[in-house]
Image: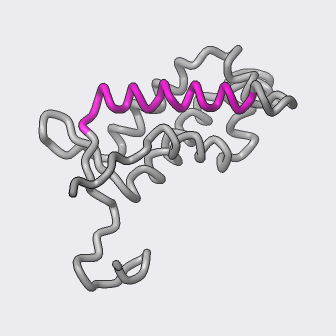
Amino acid sequence: MPEPEYDIEGAIFIRFAMVGRPVLNGLAAKGQRRRRDPQCAALFSRDIVKALRARIGFRRHREAVDDATVQEFLRAAIWEIPVEECVVLVAIDATPRDAAKREISKRLAERLKAEFEIVRDPAFHHGNSGTGPLGPRR
């Protein structure tokens, strides 16, 4: 029985909930400096790739792609999100905020799938009975 496809969109949506408010404020130009902070896009992309790599890997032309390449690709994609959409991410009303998070997650997942081949290749491999940072594999 084939393994079901990993839900990249859902994983990115969860990262929106987990990322710190200062990162989203930096993307929306709502931080202390009142302008967009490119470092926030880099931090968010690193967070997303770290979460995704726990379950999947990325390939291009059948060659494994290192995490830094994927992070840079995502950083550029996140930075291209218009500031008006990022402002909604830090709004008080949760309904449009969650809708914006879902829409942006969908677009980022589509871009990742278009650029890279997604393969089952977790960053933490335990073998059949070994232990590691995630404990014994079941």
Is residue 123 found inside the magenta-colored segment of the image?
A: no
Residue 92 lies left or right of residue 52; in this view the side is right
Q: Position of residue 9 (x, y in %)?
A: 48, 37
Q: Is residue 80 above or below residue 6?
A: above
**Dominant secondary-structure state across the stretch colored magenta:** helix
Q: Report the residue at 59% width, 46% height from top.
A: 15
- The part of the image, by quadrant, that contains residue 38 is top right
Residue in the image at 80% along x and 33% along y = 94
Q: Which image quadrant is residue 130 in?
A: bottom left
Compared with residue 26, is residue 11 higher up or lower down, i.e. above or below? below
62 lies above or below 96: below
- Furthest residue toward front: 1
Residue occupying the far left of the picture:
62
Q: Quadrant of the C terminus?
A: bottom left
Residue 114 percent location from the top left of the image: 31, 26
Magenta stretch contains residue 101: yes
Q: Residue furthest right?
A: 92
Figure coloring:
one colour
Image point (46%, 25%), residue name: 76
Count of picture labels: 0
Q: Quadrant of the N terminus?
A: bottom left
Picture residue at 28% right of the left edge, 42% below the top: 118
In the image, 110: left or right of 126? right
What percent of the width, then of the height, locates residue 44?
56, 40
* Residue 101 or residue 26, whichever sits in front: 101
**Highlighted magenta segment, given as a residue range:** 97-117
Which one is nearer the viewer's eye here, 42 or 129? 129
Horizontal side of 124 relative to 84 (left or right) equals left
